[in-house]
Image: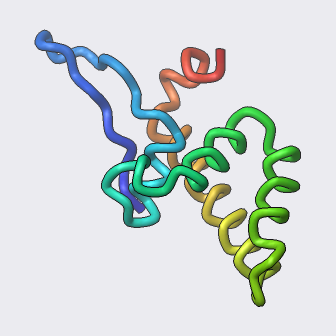
Amino acid sequence: MLIPLLDRTESGRVGNTKRFSHYVARQLGFEDANECPELYKLAHNYMQNPKVCEVKMFEYFGNEAEGEGLYMKLMEEFERCIFCYFAFHWSRVSDMIT
């Protein structure tokens, strides 16, 4: 697991926190979330409403031969990522949720 990146200000304080969708993209091997716009959207939606995202994700993989397996693997990865993301940023959770 990669740790989520933190931006620091010149004084050394924590500045902006990387978005969850960017963290997921990095975790899955993309340096830039813009390389995978659909994954970026799914990860962003997962943070906002996991149940709706599950439906969208299933629709996304619906035409694939092994779509259900891909769906399950991506859901598991999102769950691992969100636990790691919030565990690392525990002191900033309230800022990130609002």
- Rendered residue at 45%/47% (across/down): 23
* Quadrant of the image occupied by residue 13: top left
x, y percent for residue 25? 46, 54
x, y percent for residue 60? 76, 64
x, y percent for residue 22? 45, 44
Q: Residue furthest left?
A: 10
x, y percent for residue 18? 40, 33
Q: Nearer the viewer, residue 90 or 57?
A: 57
Q: Nearer the viewer, residue 87 or 19?
A: 19
Q: Quadrant of the N terminus?
A: bottom left
Q: Is 37 displayed left or right of 49 in the figure? A: left
Taking 92 as reference, is 24 above or below it? below
Taking 69 as reference, is 58 above or below it? above
Taking 24 as reference, is 16 above or below it? above
- Rendered residue at 42%/47% (across/down): 34
Colouring used for the render: rainbow
Q: Quadrant of the C terminus?
A: top right
Q: Nearer the viewer, residue 82 or 75?
A: 75
- Rendered residue at 84%/63% (across/down): 59
Q: Is 39 displayed left or right of 54 in the figure? A: left
Q: Is 49 displayed left or right of 94 in the figure? A: right
> How many labels were placed on the picture?
0
Q: Residue furthest front?
A: 63
* Quadrant of the image occupied by residue 8: top left
* Quadrant of the image occupied by residue 74: bottom right
Q: Residue furthest bottom?
A: 65
